[in-house]
Amino acid sequence: PHNPFGFEGLTYDDVLLLPNETDVIPSEVDTTARLTREITMKVPLLSAAMDTVTESRMAIAMARQGGIGILHRNLSIEAQAKQVDLVKRSESGMITDPVTVSPDATLAELDALCGQYRVSGLPVIDADGRLVGIITNRDLRFVPPSDFPNRKVHEVMTAMPLVTGPVGISREDAAALLGKNRIEKLPLVDDDGRLQGLITVKDFVKTEQYPDATKDPDGRLRVGAAIGFFGDALDRAGALRDAGVDVLVADTANGHARLMLEMITKLKNDPYFKDVQVIGGNVATRAGAQALVDAGADGVKVGVGPGSICTTRVVAGVGVPQVTAIYEASLACRPAGVPVIGDGGLQYSGDIAKALVAGADTVMLGSLLAGCDESPGDLVFINGKQFKLYRGMGSIGAMASRGKKVSYSKDRYFQADVASDDKIVPEGIEGQVPYRGPLGAVAYQLVGGLHQSMFYVGAHTIPELQERGKFVRITAAGLKESHPHDIQMTVEAPNYTGR
Ligand code: RVP
């Protein structure tokens, strides 16, 4: 008869990396990693496609740090495409498709646009697309906000002639023009005076401020977005592509499912999506990873049940401890040249290097980022301490329709057909994590921890880490020894707040 017992599975807490001979200086390592077949990033981190982790603010912050954010899909197609748009317009060498305002718009409308896109001013164009002026904070300074609803843009804007640049102007020439004229925005116009782009001082400053930022060939921040495999998933993929998404992540709790594999093949065979990379997941076995590779995926996301908010392993009794899952998936992905993303279960910065040595190229983080300023949701105060809400996409809260017309999260767990909220079988829970401040500080500690790992292992690069890294398996006593012990912690470290 068939023997159902396989091998033993290990996870982060079961292993440690062996120290090795080293000439590496932590601050000098190169953490460049492959996200997909065609995209690399300076920092091997992704923020999770969860509604308490990644919307446009987090995605912008992640890309600036050198990683990438994957926008969640628990919202309408239009709303998710809008999020992509906000990221793609946030910062760029040259804005090819700037937000503009009409001369007849009211100042109230202008104010709303500036708030939405977090910009301080807009070019003004007429109905033919011709540049007629520019309007910035400076022009508004002497108009009382109570007048905004009944004053028009053309009454207060700085009208033509303006300093403009020709299409195709070099970075250096643009910087010189901005500096010489002491202006902050340089509209680019063609021979007919039509607005074709915009260069801003802010973007020059940000380029210097975020040298590792993950950018597309046009200098815009890169962004990923989750899609399903069911119902209008292809329409969603199309809308996200039109908004400029770089990576689509076909996102389910079981990526080794026929519908998911077909979805990936469809996207990869459609010339309309030729400039978009497609990641598939999640899987936790070698066969599952092989199926995604065979379907044409540009990246394979691994993790069934390791998530901090996930109950799949207890509700369904299914899953693979994450270090083993990553290793098994890499056996199929490495030979095919397809990068692996280790998704879920990371609790400390040291887990990043463990994931990479096990066979991942990058890791996806939920709980470690949910407490950041840039994650959706407000701070909650409990007993004088600050928290942010964090919930599984398979929790009742995320899957229930409640006020919403549809919950897009249900099909992640193949429960799209469940008609009423009380018939949902949740695979996740809802909770809160400590408030952590801005992503920049959190990412600094996570990446800094990885630098230290690379120093101990003697690796200058991620491929070297993957090659030189070796594990020692530890026992419960070894794990106890690894954490602070026999002491009462009196001061929290920025990268360790206890177990
Ligand atoms: P963690 O970083 O351990 O918090 O895990 C985050 C990951 O957990 C997500 O990227 C996703 O793969 C998974 N997840 C999200 N929701 C649920 C659930 O409700 N079970 N699981």
Image (cartoon, rainbow, N blue to C red):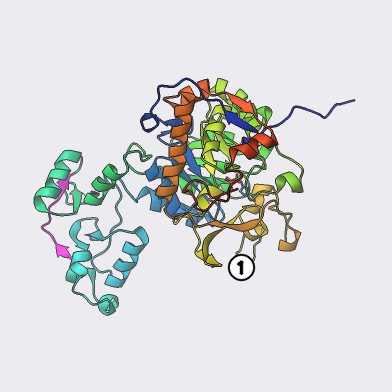
Q: Quadrant of residue 485?
A: top right
Q: Inspect this view and state whether residue 422 appears.
A: yes
Q: Secondary structure at mark 1?
A: loop
Q: Inspect this view and state whether residue 169 appears.
A: no
Main SS class of the magenta portion in the image:
loop
Task: Examine the structure image and report whether residue 381 is included in the region drawn in magenta.
Answer: no
- Which residue ends up furthest to the front in the rendered image? 486
- Horizontal placement of 23 versus 230: left or right? left
Q: Quadrant of residue 360?
A: top right
Q: According to the image, label 1 marks what residue? A: 403
Which region is colored magenta?
157-166
Could you tell me which residue is drawn at 24 percent across and 75 percent down?
Answer: 151
- Horizontal placement of 58 versus 28: left or right? right
- Horizontal placement of 480 versus 463: left or right? right
Image height check: is 22 above or below 324?
above
Pick whichever, 432 or 120, lies toward us: 432
User: Whole-percent x and y of residue 167?
Assistant: 20, 43
User: Whole-percent x and y of residue 425?
Assistant: 74, 54
Pick whichever, 230 or 468, lies toward us: 468
Image height check: is 378 above or below 279?
below
